[in-house]
Image (cartoon, rainbow, N blue to C red):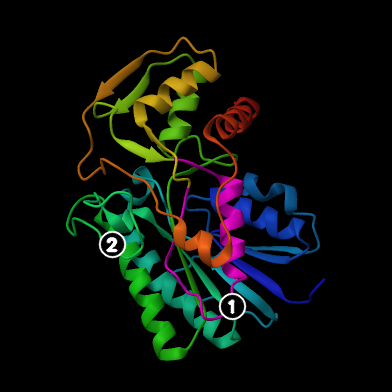
Amino acid sequence: MSNKWVVVFGGAGFLGSNLCSSLLNSEKKVICIDNLYTGNLKNIEPFQDNKNFLYFNHDITEKWTTDLELESIYNLACPASPFHYQKNPIYTLKINFNGALNVLELAGRHNVPVFQASTSEIYGDPQEHPQVEKYWGNVNSIGIRSCYDEGKRVAETLFFDFHRENNVDIKVARIFNTYGPNMDVQDGRVVSNFIVQALKNNDITIYGDGTQTRSFCYVTDLIDGFIRLMNTNSSLHGPYNLGNPSEFTVKDLAEKIIKLTSSDSKIIYLPLPSDDPIRRKPDISKAAKDFNWSPTIDIEEGLLKTINYFNKIN
């Protein structure tokens, strides 16, 4: 085992805790940094007694330094659901710019590669389908989602400018809808909402008419993409779409979950929120070509695993 440490900002969150688990399982030494704004200590409890795991409660908008020798840095620190990022939009913007700059400067000081968890929200309500990385997007810069959408866009700008000016090895991934264990029950994401409502036999709430589409990637597939991208040579920076290209309507998803949970839930419809994208589907051919990545877990298998997780915690 190497004496170098992998730093995961946002490591107590949904994606971050799954990344920490995967890294530890591959015998990496992991430093988790999270101020628990949306992360949860329960997500990292299984690692707390592991001598190769360190946790620091720290806000990414403030500089963090260490004398430990680092191997790489992953930046996953940002609220990712509308409920959380709209709660304090200015803080969301600070996370995306000030936080990203702090992470980049840390990578520069230690001369290590740094990964940025970007998002499919880069594309806004896309006018091209499926979405390819060269598409510049269709984003409202002054809407209620803009703190996240434009925050992630400026973070990408910052990463690439920092790379050009300082020759830091960056890895940028645009994440499409992801689901699985350690999702927050209260975060308002569509998969967790539907599963919790179905398990309680409550009405399942669809915003809009349910014909809007999403592509859902199981979390272990996504984390495998993170690690494969981090392990690419220094000539590859992205951005790369990471997601499952299988496309479903939101209504299809609700019906699948009702069936898999044997629920008595009924579907009800509420108004569609402002700037909510109508279609989402990643073109992942670039990731497949450059680091041989594609998802392997289909929607039914992934949903069953996720339903089992929510059954255990409720």
Q: Is residue 217 rendered magenta in the image? A: yes
- Which residue corresponds to the image point at 35% horizontal and 31% vertical from the top-left? 249
Furthest-top residue in this view:
264
Which range of residues does the magenta coloring cover? 216-243
Q: Secondary structure at mark 1?
A: loop
Left or right: 69 as drawn, with respect to 146:
right
- Which residue corresponds to the image point at 45% horizontal and 58% vertical from the top-left? 285
Query: Can you say which quadrant of the picture contains the N terminus?
Result: bottom right
- Which residue corresponds to the image point at 48% horizontal and 68% vertical from the top-left? 60
Residue 135 - label: 2
Q: CA distance from mark 2 to mark 1?
A: 24 Å
Q: Secondary structure at mark 2?
A: loop
Query: Quick one: 54 or 175, which is closer to the camera?
Result: 175
Q: Which residue is mark 1?
A: 233
Query: Quick one: 291 or 80, which is closer to the camera?
Result: 291
- Is any part of residue 216 visible from this angle? yes
What x and y, as percent, mark residue 281?
37, 46
Task: Give the answer, above or below, for where 200 lies relative to 2.
Answer: above
Query: Can you say which quadrant of the picture contains the C terminus?
Result: top right
- Which residue corresponds to the image point at 74% horizontal and 65% vertical from the top-left? 28
**Amino acid at the residue labelled 1:** Asn
What x and y, as percent, mark residue 113?
57, 77
Q: Is residue 290 rendered magenta in the image? A: no
